[in-house]
Amino acid sequence: MDRRKQYTRMVLKESLLKLLQDKSISSITIKEICETADINRSTFYAHYANQYELLEAIEEEFIEDLTVTLGQYNFSKEEEALQMTEKLFEYLAEKSGICHTLLGENTDMYFLKKGMKITHEFIFKNWITDSEIDQETYEYINIFLVSGSIHVIKNWLENGMEKTPGEMAGILYNFINRGLSGVQ
């Protein structure tokens, strides 16, 4: 893709993210995106069909970057899960602006669901290895852990990331491995 197209797509993405800070995706118009980006409608339509496709492109780009970043680490054992969780929090802190917007109330549920899948894939897939747990029970536990973790991350971002990524990873790790008795 040439530089002009890359620039146009970047400006459109930035414009939509800016608008999402104050409005829901369903109430944002193509006209508003174009005015914010300072481009005409035909240019917008040369790249995206609608605001939802643009949002999906932003989400996919973020998720791809997160997957590549986490994929650089080979933390596959349970004892390495704390390190992977800390890397996840470091990444989210670095990208806090876009994370806050994408996890906010003004977007759709797609990003949240995809985030849950990635969290499971990179963090929790090796934490519960007890062969006595049946698959259905494992799925319930996994959904509880992943969705709870996503909401902890969301709350951490919304409250200004007062704790460090290492502290947050420790909190999650201790809670998941020791329950409420692990929280001090």
Image (cartoon, helix red, strand yellow):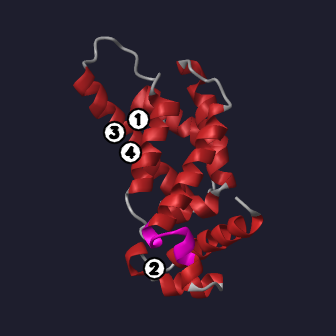
Counting from the top left corner in percent of width and height, residue 86 is at: 63, 37
Vertical position of residue 173 compared to residue 155: above or below: above
Q: Amino acid at mark 4?
A: Ser
Q: Quick one: label 1 or label 4, which is nearer the N terminus?
A: 4
Instruction: Compute the Cα span from label 1 to label 4.
Output: 17 Å
Circle 4 residue: 147
Q: Which mark is residue 45?
A: none
Q: Quick one: label 3 or label 2, which is nearer the N terminus?
A: 2
Circle 3 residue: 144
Circle 1 residue: 180
Counting from the top left corner in percent of width and height, residue 75 is at: 61, 24
Q: Amino acid at mark 2?
A: Lys
Q: Which residues are magenta?
A: 44-52
Q: Nearer the viewer, mark 1 or mark 3?
A: 3
77 is within the stretch colored magenta: no
Chief secondary structure of the magenta span? Answer: helix
Dot 4 alpha-carbon crowd within 10 angstroms: few under 14, some 14 to 19, many 20 or more = some
Q: Amino acid at mark 1?
A: Leu
Q: Quick one: label 4 or label 2, which is nearer the N terminus?
A: 2
Q: Are marks 1 and 3 in contact (CB under 8 Å)?
A: no
Q: Are marks 3 and 2 in contact (CB under 8 Å)?
A: no
Mark 3 residue element: helix
Q: Are marks 4 and 3 in contact (CB under 8 Å)?
A: yes
**Of the pair 179 and 107, the residue shown nearer to us:** 107
Mark 1 residue element: helix
Circle 2 residue: 23
**Of the pair 4 and 19, the residue shown nearer to us:** 4
Instruction: Compute the Cα span from label 4 to label 2.
Output: 24 Å
- At 40% from the left and 35% from the top, the residue drawn is 180
Instruction: Compute the Cα span from label 4 to label 3.
Output: 6 Å
Q: Amino acid at mark 3?
A: Phe
- At 33% from the left and 38% from the top, the residue drawn is 143
